[in-house]
């Protein structure tokens, strides 16, 4: 291995180990950022603030759609024909309508 010093090989090994760890345990930061952005958007809508909403619900939906497409350009097309999931307990406790 002519041309490589011990330090170079050490850096290459560290890089390989870091990539291997990344493949086994992908970082959650992308999802954490996504959830934070969605929560920020929803927190400004009529559904959360009522008459003092800072963001129209249709605009909020478009912003969330854009965030989804940034993560996966085909996700909406892939799930377009899926049944809606059942309402969660939190949504029903908040007084939402059961008619969907």
Image (spheres, rainbow, N blue to C red):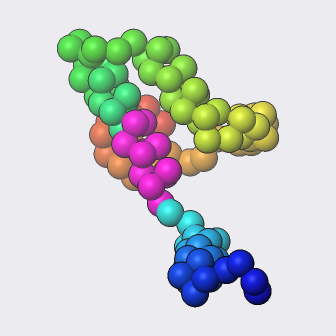
- Where is residue 84, by image quadrant? top right
- Where is residue 71, by image quadrant? top right
User: Can you say whether 43 is above or below 19 in the image?
Assistant: above
Q: Whole-percent x and y of residue 37? A: 40, 36
Q: Whole-percent x and y of residue 60? A: 45, 21
Answer whether residue 35 is magenta in the image: yes
Between 13 and 64, the one nearer to me in the picture: 13
Quarter of the picture containing the N terminus is bottom right
In this picture, which residue range is highlighted in magenta?
Answer: 28-38
Q: Whole-percent x and y of residue 41? A: 37, 28
Residue found at the far front of this picture: 3
Q: Residue at x 72, y 35 (%)?
A: 73
Q: Is residue 100 in sight in this rendering? A: no
Q: Residue at x 68, y 41 (%)?
A: 72
Q: Whole-percent x and y of residue 97? A: 43, 32
Between 82 and 78, the one nearer to me in the picture: 78
User: Can you say whether 48 is above or below 6 in the image?
Assistant: above
């Amino acid at each position: 291995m002519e041309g490589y010093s011990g330090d170079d090989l050490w850096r290459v090994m560290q890089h390989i180990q870091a990539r291997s760890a990344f493949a086994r345990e992908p970082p959650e930061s992308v999802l954490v950022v996504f959830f934070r952005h969605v929560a920020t958007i929803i927190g400004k809508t009529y559904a959360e603030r009522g008459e003092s909403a800072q963001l129209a619900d249709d605009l909020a939906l478009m912003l969330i759609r854009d965030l989804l497409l940034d993560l996966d350009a085909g996700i909406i097309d892939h799930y377009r024909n899926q049944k809606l999931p059942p309402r969660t307990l939190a949504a029903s406790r908040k007084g939402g309508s059961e008619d969907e």
